Every structure is written in C-alpha cells, then in structure tokens.
Image (cartoon, rainbow, N blue to C red):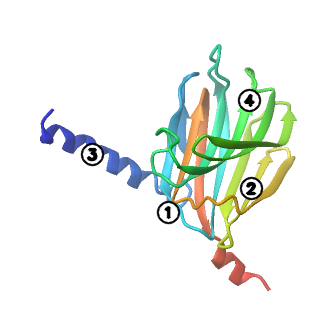
C-alpha cells in the first residue's frame, strides 16, 4: 500500500478524534452489534477532571456468549483495544443481562494482566437513562458514580491505584441508543465552593 493510501485513513482517524472531543454536550447515536465493541467518544484526559456521560438506551443486541455492556474508560494509552502490556486503566462499566432487566455497575482497575473488579451497584427494572461519572483528583484519587433515571445510584472512590490516565474512551457492546459526554475541570468547581 502506498503512502498516499495511508493519508486519507490517517486524516479520517484524526477527524474522528477531533469530532469526538466535545466542547459542549452533544448526542452521539450508537448501535453496536452483540459480540462487538465500538468506541463512541475518545478524548484527552488530565488530572483534576471528570467525565460525565448520560446514556439513553433504545435497544439491546444480544450475542450468545457476550453480554451487552457500556463503559467509560480512563487509560494511560490512546488505544484501549491494544494488548494490555503495562497500560493502566480505570473503567466504569455497566453489564446488562440479555433483556436489560437487570444491571450491575462495576469499577475495574487494571495494569497489564493484573485486574481488579468491584461490583458497586446493582438494580433491576426497565432502564431508559443512566449517568456515569468518573474523575481523577490531583491527589490520585478516582471518584465514580452511576445514577439511573429513577434516582437510584451507587458511588465510591479508588484511593490512588497508581494509574495516571491521559485518555478517556467511551465504548459500547451489544447496545443501541444515544450518549452525550462532557469533561469538567474539578479545580474550577473547587474554587467556586466556600
């Protein structure tokens, strides 16, 4: 393949990253088949920030061996689909059963092959909307929360897992709907508090 053939692919990839960097919330539609994973948003991330994503589900695409899920990932490397290597990541994940009637929310921290998963919230009933928030304070503490449209929620903290993410990636598998994400500067919010 000639160098000229790579230029359009590179330009499209760069355009995708630029378009995925929201300055204000914008709805992104997604419809990911069961058994596949697709990145919906990808943007830069730095300490003292949090990413807030509001997800509205419209459908579930089942797969016989792979349950539907939605994740907000903070990663040390841009390509979260690459082999683990020494990449550190913190993932806020919703795992749904086949019909979406029950959900479990997880916080997953991993570096290379070492991974820890904490189920911090579970619920049942029809889900139409949920909001996921994950952030990193400048002291190395990750805060996370999940709030469903009926007001039920779960939240927690991961105290300095030794991961310094540079990228935020939002991915879905086996789901259809829309999502909008916004990055918030925590230092600006702290300055506004008494």
The quarter of the displayed image where residue 164 is located:
bottom right
Q: Secondary structure at mark 1?
A: loop
Q: Earlier in the sequence, mark 2 or mark 1?
A: 1
Report how far apart the C-alphas of labels 2 and 1 lie in the structure: 22 Å
Q: Could you tell me which secondary element the residue under label 2 belongs to?
A: strand
**Mark drawn on residue 10:** 3
Q: Cβ–Cβ below 8 Å for labels 2 and 1?
A: no
Return the mark for residue 96.
4
Mark 3 neighbour density, 10 Å: few (under 14) some (14–19) many (20 or more): few
Mark 3 secondary-structure assignment: helix
> Front-most of 167 and 43?
167
The part of the image, by quadrant, that contains residue 71 is top right
Query: Which sits earlier in the primary sequence, circle 3 or circle 4?
Result: 3
Please state which of the two labelled residues, at mark 3 or mark 1, is closer to the viewer: 3
Numbered tag placed on residue 144 in the rendering: 2
Q: Comparing marks 1 and 4, which lies closer to the viewer?
A: 4
Q: Which of pointers 1 and 4 lies earlier in the amino acid sequence?
A: 1
Quarter of the figure that contains the N terminus = top left
Callout 4: SS: strand
Q: Is residue 141 above or below residue 34?
A: below
Q: From the viewer's perspective, tell me whether residue 150 is left or right of residue 169.
A: right
For residue 8, above or below residue 69: below
């Amino acid at each position: 393949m000639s160098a000229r053939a790579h230029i359009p692919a590179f330009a499209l990839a760069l355009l995708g990253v630029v378009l995925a960097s929201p300055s204000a919330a914008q709805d992104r539609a997604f419809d990911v088949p069961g058994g596949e994973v697709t990145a919906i948003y990808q943007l830069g991330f730095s300490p003292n920030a949090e990413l807030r994503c509001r997800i509205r589900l419209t459908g579930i695409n089942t797969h016989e061996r792979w349950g539907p899920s939605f994740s907000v990932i903070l990663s040390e490397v841009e390509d979260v689909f690459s082999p683990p290597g020494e990449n550190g990541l913190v993932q806020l994940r919703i795992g749904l059963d086949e019909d979406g009637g029950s959900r479990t929310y997880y916080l997953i921290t991993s570096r290379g092959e070492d991974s820890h998963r904490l189920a911090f919230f579970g619920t049942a009933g029809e889900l139409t909307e949920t909001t996921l928030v994950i952030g990193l304070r400048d002291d190395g503490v990750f805060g996370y929360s999940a709030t469903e449209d009926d007001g039920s929620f779960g939240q927690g903290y991961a105290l300095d897992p030794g991961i310094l993410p540079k990228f935020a990636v939002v991915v879905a598998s086996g789901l259809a709907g829309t999502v909008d994400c916004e990055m918030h500067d925590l230092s600006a919010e702290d300055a506004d508090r008494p």
